[in-house]
Amino acid sequence: LQAFSLGQKIRPVKGDAAALPFYIHAIELDPNFARAYVALSLSYLTLNELQPAEEAARKAYELRDRVSEQERFIIVANYYLTGNGNPYLTANGNLYKAAQVYELWQKMYPRDSIPYVGLGYISSLLGDPNKALEEDSEALRLEPNDWVNYASVASDYMILNRFDDAQAIFRQAEDRKLEGPDLWMNRYQVAFLKGDTTRMAEAVSAAAGKPDFEDVLLATQADTEAWYGRSKNARELTRRASDLAQQNESKGRAASYLAAAALREAEFGERQLAIADAEAAVKLAPGHSQQAMAALALARAGDLAQAENLAEALDKARPTDTLTQRYWLPTIRAAVALKRNDPAKAIELLKTASTIELSAPVLVTVALCPAYVRGQAYLALHDGHSAAGEFQKLMDHRGLVANFSWGALARLGMARAYVLDARADSGARDKALTAYQDFLKLWAGADQAVPLLAKAKAEYAALRQGVYGK
């Protein structure tokens, strides 16, 4: 109990990596200490160590009859929630069952912050940021000394495009001398969204040299470089982030960085790089979230056999996982259908994802994948109006997309959508020209060797000559 209590005291202030040894020691002293297994599971989740997190969650679940009623809520909710498809988690993943447990827990113990945290988290994953903000704000009121609560509220504000409110939350956390990797990542992303390069640099500097922090900010910087088409810089930062995460014994996080890199490389036309990074991610840490991102990247890069094999494995392993079944698998299968020249099937498959496509991931900024793939499908069907509507989602939800490179590529998608209408509408041609100009301005400093850049320039030149405008 003393070891466990020290871990609980350290975690909100110094993070999960610092707390982990105390939880492990508590279990060594008492192998039937159920509550310690839950804490161990949650710390492994935050560190993206999926297999040990799942093992600890299941061990706690097996011991649930030996604990108090309140502790049983913690154990059962964690068991259902673990594995919900975000880059941290892996086990059961039924968000709706987890929500039922949290709701009952909340009614019976209204002054306990944890069920509010859980419901806020679930609401965010289900794409309801207003509900998430309501729950997370109450959690923060009840427990103002845990950095996770500040990170959750700040993230909710960011997703709602309320960037000044998010910065106010950062200041509150600073006043209490609280910090955590998500807080620093969100600080950086809000600064990016506001065009504040000074605060971006400050966030990177503050995280330098800190285990559990530095690799997160390096990966976030990689996203920014990719946003502007600076592919070489993005790859180097991803490599450093992945190497550092592995040195800190967080292979899961390292793999997530590689899988996210594969997603952007696939869209940039760097097919072999995308396939290599996707394969490396799955080999390094074959957790379901890395598999899902890697499968989508492989599908977009045209390696359909590997993409389908990973999707089939995910389907069999995670039949009750809400995000796997309703977000990732429909998007992966739609991307495969699109590569097989069946865009109508892709759109049909993506209907399953439509109600939760605003799902907010954690740590690795990968967002609105269903909308982006749906937009590509509408382009293939020559439906410019519908395609533009999908790409507009990525531009409207700036706080959700943050610096994920597909947000920048949505500008190019918009340009291509307007071109489809240009034959019948001269105004659409002007919109297409403007959209191409916006994208090419954004990528003014992009690596010239990126295949997508050459393609975009050629399309723009043809449009200026009126090739597609007639």
Image (cartoon, rainbow, N blue to C red):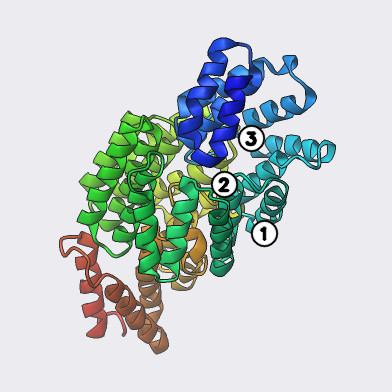
Q: Residue furthest left?
A: 449
Residue type beneath disc 2: Trp
Residue appearing at x 33%, y 44% in the figure:
209
> Is 331 situated left or right of 138 in this image?
left
Closest to the camera, between mark 1 and mark 2, is 2
Instruction: Estimate the x, y position of residue 178 in percent, counting from the top left.
Output: 54, 48
Q: Which mark is residue 147?
A: 2
Q: In the rendered image, which residue does mark 3 sit on?
A: 94
Q: Quadrant of the N terminus?
A: top right
From what the image shows, is residue 105 above or below residue 345?
A: above
Residue type beneath disc 1: Asn
Q: CA distance from mark 3 to mark 1?
A: 21 Å
Residue appearing at x 45%, y 44% in the figure:
333
Compare marks 3 and 1 and give the one earlier in the sequence: 3
Asked whether 404 or 372 is in front, the reply is 404
> Is 22 situated left or right of 102 in this image?
left
Residue appearing at x 51%, y 69% in the figure:
396
